[in-house]
Image (cartoon, rainbow, N blue to C red):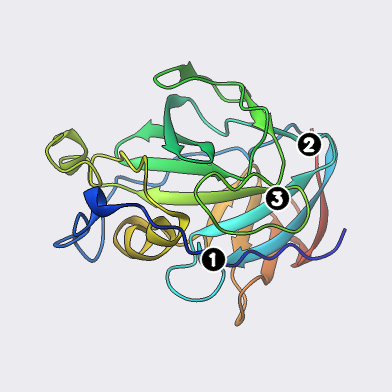
Amino acid sequence: MTKVRMRLGVVSAGAVLAGVLVGLPTAAHAEAFPVFALPFQTGQQVYSAGIHSDDGNSGVKNAIDFSPYDKTVRAPLAGTVAIQHCSGGDWVTIDHGNGWRTGYYHMENIAVTDGQAVTAGTVLGKTGNALPCGGSSTGAHVHFTLWALQESASKLRADRVAAGNWSGMSYEQVSAEVAEAYGEPVDGKSFGGYRFTEGAEQYGGTATRLRDNAVTQLPGRFRLDR
């Protein structure tokens, strides 16, 4: 598979969203990092394009692309689904408690609904090239993102962005202003027995298997053991 890269497609969110991001904090503070699996079934080969910022150009590197062999995206941890709606369709986020959220962009055949409680391993959908809010994609994958919302702010429904309601917001807005405020760097985090480290450039880094310290250079393929 060729290297997957994404660039922004400029999509207007409409006047109703104008100024909604004014006053966002520069950083969010969630609780201790949870024990996440990877967002797909074990026992298969996975391609990853490496760690990058949400827009693939600059900013907080809170994203990593995955293309599992079976093309099925699964919840990496229990939580509650929050569907984000755009004019071109939907994308999925999951709130895992204590401010932690994961995001799943480009998915097709979404298999969950807003407010649904999921467990680790619940099927969310299929890897794809969907662009519900803008952006671009070359090659079916899931654009997996990590977020740290402020738990106290997430309960203040008056601030819909802080509360995690990003419906109607363009990919450009989410990947820039929202990512700057709430994006959590993937660098140094462990998922499913692998520790991911960013590289000097976008779409790079390593995946280190924790049980034996075997290192896969990204972009590249690794096997997620059972």
Say the numbered circle drawn on residue 8. 1
Decide which of tag 1 and tag 3 comes sooner along the chain.
1
Q: Residue at x 70, y 50 (%)?
A: 66
Decide which of tag 3 and tag 2 comes sooner along the chain.
3
- How far, Cα to Cα, is label 3 from label 2? 9 Å
Find residue 33 and report its horizontal and vertical position in percent: 41, 46
Is residue 198 left or right of 133 when viewed as pictured?
right
Residue 138, above or below 98: below
Residue at numbered disc 3: 66
Decide which of tag 2 and tag 1 comes sooner along the chain.
1
Quadrant housing residue 74: top right
Which is in the foreground here, disc 2 or disc 1?
1
- How far, Cα to Cα, is label 2 from label 1? 24 Å
User: How many labels were placed on the picture?
Assistant: 3
Is residue 206 left or right of 94 when viewed as pictured?
right
Give yes or no for contact between labels 3 and 2 (Cβ–Cβ under 8 Å): no
Say the numbered circle drawn on residue 92. none
Quadrant housing residue 69: top right
- How far, Cα to Cα, is label 1 from label 3? 19 Å
**Callout 1: helix, strand or loop?**
loop
Find residue 39 and report its horizontal and vertical position in percent: 64, 38
Q: Residue at x 11, y 38 (%)?
A: 158
Q: Is residue 210 among what the camera can see?
A: no
Residue furthest to the bottom in view is: 200
Give yes or no for contact between labels 1 and 3 (Cβ–Cβ under 8 Å): no
Q: Residue at x 66, y 55 (%)?
A: 65
Give yes or no for contact between labels 2 and 1 (Cβ–Cβ under 8 Å): no
Residue at numbered disc 2: 71
